[in-house]
Amino acid sequence: MIKKIGIIGAGKMGEALIAGFLKSKAFTPQDICASEIVEGRRRYIADTYHIECFEDIEKVVAFSDLIIVAVKPGNVKNVLEGIGKAITPEKSLVSIAAGITLDYLIRYLPKEIPVIRVMPNLACFVREGMMAVCPSESTSHERLEAVKENLGLLGRVITLEEKYFDAVTGLVGSGPAYIYLVIEALSDAGVKLGLPKDIATTLVAQTVLGAGKMVVETGEHPARLREMVATPGGTTIEGLIELERGRLRATLIDAVVKATERAKELSKA
Ligand SMILES: NC(=O)c1ccc[n+]([C@@H]2O[C@H](COP(=O)([O-])OP(=O)(O)OC[C@H]3O[C@@H](n4cnc5c(N)ncnc54)[C@H](OP(=O)(O)O)[C@@H]3O)[C@@H](O)[C@H]2O)c1
């Protein structure tokens, strides 16, 4: 486990990482700092999480042994140029930027720096994130394991070849947004049927959480679990037929393919 963490870019994802690490109780606010360009955001992060939030990237690099770059892809080059002057090989660098490849990251850093590309999602906020990691060649096994131990506090972590990262971006990085849309639609169905909105949303969100947990914890095929709900001649099969008529399955596949294509475009930019 790496004890001092610095997050560069305390936006939506940077905040999720800060919140998740602090909720894990493995870190105190004295172990984490951040850098953020937007002044109001700096104040919000410092007030909410009681961590130091600087404007100056070099202060974060000097403080941290694990530096996590969480700015938008278009700002990564700028940030790396700032980091490159201050980073040393005992430190590790993680980038979570969509479409930003290891080759690109390495180009702006001294060559012995361990660099790890990670694709997480927003659920790191509640320590139920899904993260894929891919190390650069100069990253030792021990260093990768240490970084994975840190990230493991935020959810599930798997090591994957970089060739899968665009697909993981479309599936894992963007994934929560698809599910939020599904939750919204199902809770609207509850409202149409007369349920109060807040109750409908709670009913649906917990149903989604439970369904996901069943897949993860039982290891059963989702189709088998679906069959367990859809009893012959019952209510569920009526609903499932409507979903097939609406091409839900094909639409979800198309959505992930489109998001993956966009991730590919970003990596070429
Ligand atoms: N959001 C997600 O669910 C998600 C999931 C997986 C991966 N990611 C990746 O995570 C990264 C961040 O995404 P996000 O949604 O958190 O974006 P965001 O909310 O825009 O956060 C990035 C923050 O970094 C700030 N920033 C820009 N340049 C900076 C610099 N030089 N030093 C310090 N701070 C700087 C930004 O300010 P400005 O607004 O002025 O640029 C912004 O406040 C992206 O690369 C994205 O691909 C996001």
Image (cartoon, rainbow, N blue to C red):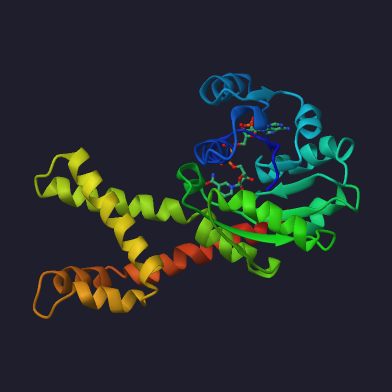
Q: Where's residue 1, x and y in %?
A: 68, 48
Residue at 44% over, 69% down: 253
Q: Is 41 or 217 nearer to us in this picture? A: 217
Q: Is 202 or 183 nearer to us in this picture? A: 202
Q: Please determine whether, in this image, residue 23 is positioned above or below residue 224.
A: above
User: With 110 as the anchor, is 179 left or right in this view?
Assistant: left
Residue at 66% over, 23% down: 52
Q: Please determine whether, in this image, residue 35 is positioned above or below residue 74.
A: above
**Which quarter of the frame holds ligand 1?**
top right
Is residue 241 visible in this depiction of the protein? Answer: yes
Q: Where's residue 93, x and y in %?
A: 76, 47
Residue at 46% over, 56% down: 175
Tell me the quarter of the picture where residue 165 sits.
Answer: bottom right
Q: Is 16 or 90 nearer to us in this picture? A: 90
Tell me the quarter of the picture where residue 21 sits.
Answer: top right
Q: Please determine whether, in this image, residue 44 is positioned above or below residue 219.
A: above
Is residue 99 visible in this depiction of the protein? Answer: no
Q: Where's residue 15, x and y in %?
A: 55, 35
Q: Is 170 or 131 nearer to us in this picture? A: 131
Residue at 46% over, 51% down: 128
Q: Where's residue 207, x and y in %?
A: 26, 56
User: With 40 as the anchor, is 65 left or right in this view?
Assistant: right
Q: Please determine whether, in this image, residue 13 is positioned above or below residue 239.
A: above
